[in-house]
Amino acid sequence: VQLQASGGGLVQTGGSLRLSCTASGHRMIDYSMRWFRQAPGKEREGIACISIRDGNTYYSDSAKGRFTISRDNAKNTVYLQMNSLKPEDTAVYYCAARAGWSKSSSSYDYDYWGQGTLVTVSS
């Protein structure tokens, strides 16, 4: 499984971005995919996950209400729509995948990783 993340960039406080993560090399129907982020000097944080089969979602407290994870199974792609961005959302965002449904936010529970895309929110 190869994951390709994209969509990061520079945005002002209050702005929006949509990240994409496209999988290749395997049908993802029985996988969970999660977005993580890692800010400088901080631990990697799991922020949202989705079941590819049925679309179940789960969000961290920091993502609830502002971020929406979704998937397009025909494109083997998962999205993270981020609204009302804040400077503290600045981080490298990674997508990751694992077989089966899991709400786990531990990076150790995910087997496949994208390369990361940088999101910078200016104040």
Image (tube, rainbow, N blue to C red):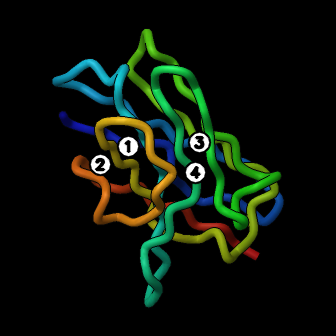
Q: Which residue is mark 2?
A: 114
How far apart, in angstroms, are the residues tagged by discs 4 and 2?
A: 15 Å
Residue 72 position, x and y percent, is 51, 18
Q: Secondary structure at mark 2?
A: loop
Specify which label sits upstream in the sequence, 3 or 4: 4
Residue position for label 1: 5
As measured in the structure, the alpha-carbon distance from the residue carrying label 3 to the one carrying label 1 is 10 Å
Q: Secondary structure at mark 3?
A: strand
Q: 31 left or right of 66? A: left
Return the x and y of residue 57 as percentages of the image width and height.
Answer: 62, 39
**Sequence-wise first label, 3 or 2:** 3
- The answer to whether mark 3 and mark 1 are in CB contact below 8 A is no
Mark 2 burial class by Cα count in 10 Å: few <14, some 14-19, many 20+: many
The residue identified by callout 4 is 48
- Asked if labels 4 and 3 touch by Cβ distance under 8 angstroms, the answer is yes
Q: Residue at x 29, y 65 (%)?
A: 108
Q: CA distance from mark 1 to mark 2?
A: 6 Å
Circle 1 — which element?
Answer: strand
Choose the circle earlier in sequence order: 4 or 1: 1
Amino acid type at image mark 4: Ala
Closer to the N terminus: mark 1 or mark 2?
A: 1
